[in-house]
Amino acid sequence: MARIPKLDPDALHAARAQMRIDLAACHRLAAQFGMTDLIYTHISARVPGAPDQFLINPFGLLFDEVRADNLVTVGPEGELLDDPTGLGINRAGFVIHSAVHQARPDAVCVMHTHTLAGVAVSALRDGLLPYTQHAARFHGRIGYHAYEGVAVELDERARLVRDLGPHKALMLRNHGLLTCGATVAEAFELMFFLEFACRAQLQIQATGQAVAIPDRGAIERAAQTFDRAAGRSSPRLWQALLRGLDQTDPTYRHLPAAH
């Protein structure tokens, strides 16, 4: 695990509160954009100042019920350090998210979805194809993990990490999508555009017409452009998304009394 710079108590308090708010917002946005599977997927974020702990949604709440004050704090062995609702967490959520958080210090936020488009493309032999500019963002930058059944066995974590490799996106075959980022904003932005690319691919393939596949060099240049912009556009986008949430339902911001 990489060394985490120490924050003074006030800065740590503020960072933890903001992380809770951002993670709760991410759940609300996933619900808003149709990236949910009832209560069966999960989004997590590392606790500032405690790199072996992460926050995750309670198992039993819809994403539009998640707030900053009802997130569960999970320890390195899956112990529930704080469980405000008493609902616990999804076992597969711990297996998948702990694997990435433990192996990738840069993965502050991990987002996992089971969308119709994501599951459909994950079941295609060739996976995500470079049909669109949105897909070009992931050219040579997405891993593939073979389906092993419901992800409840701890030994699968090593293979998840192996298949993710250095990437920030993973397609879990016959299962769904995963993205990770240095911030909640980055993980959400990657998931939004990965989902968009999957939806576009399915609509293109559904026409049955020949596809105009971009030149391979152009695809790689586009991917490199996205690499250079990575993390820089996310804060601007994130603030715009939060403004939208605040106008419709700001209850996601409710913090625990201690905060």
Image: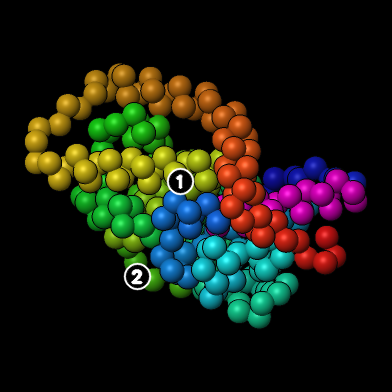
Circle nearer the N terminus (2, 1): 2
CA distance separating discs 2 and 1: 23 Å
Q: Position of residue 126 (x, y in %)?
A: 22, 45
Magenta highlight on residue 215: no
On screen, 228 above or below 184? above
Q: Position of residue 242 (x, y in %)?
A: 62, 45
Element assignment for label 2: loop
Q: Is residue 96 above or below residue 215?
A: below
Q: Which residues are magenta?
A: 9-27
Determine crowd level at label 2: few under 14, some 14-19, many 20+ residues with C-alpha closer than 10 A.
Answer: few
> Which residue type does callout 2 highlight?
Gly
Percent from the top left, x then y, of residue 252?
A: 65, 58
Extreme residue toward the bottom, this view: 86
Q: Is residue 145 visible?
A: no
Q: Residue 172: x percent and y percent?
A: 36, 56
**In percent of the image, x 83 and y 60: which residue is there?**
259
Would residue 36 be found to the left or right of residue 129 on screen? right
Q: Indicate which disc residue 191 carries.
A: 1
Q: Residue at x 15, y 45 (%)?
A: 206
Between circles 2 and 1, the one closer to the viewer is: 1
Mark number, residue 65:
none
Give the residue at mark 2.
149
Please say if 206 is above or below 83. above
Mark 1 surroundings: few (<14), some (14-19) or many (≥20) residues within 10 A = many
* Residue kind at label 1, given as amino acid type: Met
> Judging from the image, what secondary structure is the residue with disc 1 in?
helix
The answer to which of 158 and 37 lies nearer the viewer is 37
Query: Which residue is at a point 37% across and 51% down the rendered structure image?
Result: 171
The residue nearer to you, when weighing 34 against 180, is 34
> Can residue 175 be seen?
yes
Residue ID at (61%, 32%): 236
Prevailing secondary structure class for the magenta stretch in the rendered image: helix
